Amino acid sequence: MTTETCAPTPALLALLRACDGSIEPRSQGAEARVYDVQLSGVECVAKQRFAKTYRLRELDERLTRSRLSAEARTMVRARKLGVLAPHVVHVDAKESCVYMERIRGCALKEALRSGETTREDLRRFGEEIGVAVAKLHDGGIIHGDLTTSNLMVRDEDGRVVVIDFGLSYPSKLPEDKGVDLYVLERAITAAHPSQTVLFDDILAAYKKTSQMWCSTLNRFAEVRARGRKRSMVG
Amino acid sequence: MARVRYDAVPGDDAPEARSWTFASVTNARAVVDAARAGTLDACVLDGRSVVGARALDMACYRARVAIDRGEGVARGAHAEIILGLSHSRNVGEAFRRFGGGETSETLVIVAFEDASGGDRGIEARVMELVEGRLTSFDDRGAIDEASIKTWFKIGDAELALGGSLEDAVLSRMAIRDVA
């Protein structure tokens, strides 16, 4: 990948220069870079997707645009459903950039690893995550990447905020919901083996909140037995 | 004098937008007609429909970006501001909902500066034209919250999350072009 494809685009660059002049990203993932900016007096993070030069340009543009749209729309839909997610401030489709509220806090992963989490904290996190995931699923949204890195604990009130809807998609199938829960279970058991009780709390809250918990949890049990991917043999 | 300045596109040579807010306006029709006829080079908004300063700021930013890129769909930069406040791409609907009307009592008038930072005589023209009490944007009075919630489809579940009505409106404005 060339450096040109990763550099901030003009409108984002203007905003970065207007803030503190730094054009260094706060973090970088496989698909996007994240910058801290201020837009219209609002502290935001700008998530800019970059071009993948190994893909056909037309295909890359189409994929990038559809993922950007899906991410922004899903965040708005999630909030409509009552799920705590960052609110979208601006979408610049031409520059493949979505500007969203900056959440002050730390990733749940860090909070769990800090060693300061009590059983009561775990119970509260589990309850909040279970309710959030149930609301998303009942509203037909699959997050697609539920891990403890994509759940943040907000500084101001300690509430859990769901972030990174980059892999989310609309679906009402129990299979997709089951896989979503399975991914979360695997993330918790792999990254926090001594705190797996968190997932039990999540499932209990999910069951209490979701109106379609029965079919989802039945399918989840199947997914758990076979693994995330279906067998394609035969 | 109460005047609110908004940054449009940040940068050394970026033009800014200025706004003037008037309460108890008695000649809204004449002001709107002047804007339509082009004798007032500014956009005229109904103060009750503008949810907040951040929304207006974002609308100015979006208008500026659209014009700079040659992607504007409305008649000019000022019409683009009205469109920028809307969640829909329908220009007529945006004017009906956010533009000043015959019966508007609160008007917010927004104009972009020229490249050198001058106001092209707009301020003098506005003061001459509008019959009303000049006030600050924050003192423009109550907004039409019920209509705003209906237009932007904002429900109680979302507001219960703790964000403001303006946050919810901003997010609808933001996804207009990708919805």
Image (cartoon, rainbow, N blue to C red):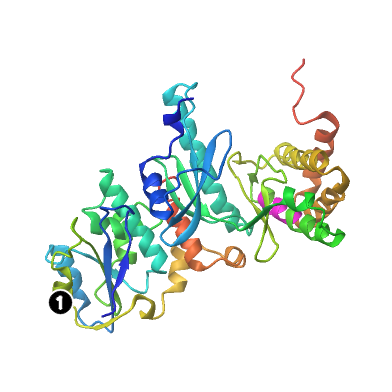
* Amino acid at the residue labelled 1: Leu
Viewer-closest of A184 and A4: A4
Indicate the position of residue A98 as horizontal and vertical percent values: 48, 46
Height in image: B141 above or below A35?
A: below
| In magenta segment, residue A122 | no
Position of the C terminus of chain A, as image quadrant, is top right
The answer to whether one can see residue B58 in this image is: yes
Residue at 39% across, 68% down: B53
User: Which residue is identified by label 1?
Assistant: B129
Indicate the position of residue A49 as horizontal and vertical percent values: 49, 37
Q: Tell me the subunit letter for badge 1.
A: B
Task: Using the rendered view, name the quadrant where residue B50 is placed.
Answer: bottom left
Q: Which residues are magenta?
A: A130-136
Viewer-closest of B109 and B103: B109
Task: Using the rendered view, name the quadrant where residue B115 is placed.
Answer: bottom left
The answer to whether one can see residue B93 in this image is: no
A13 displayed left or right of A173: left
- Magenta stretch secondary structure, dominant: helix
B58 displayed left or right of A85: left
Viewer-closest of B85 and B16: B16
Height in image: A132 above or below B156?
A: above
Indicate the position of residue B77 as horizontal and vertical percent values: 24, 55
B43 displayed left or right of B154: left
Q: Which residue in the rendered view is the most extreme toward the top?
A: A234
A44 displayed left or right of A130: left
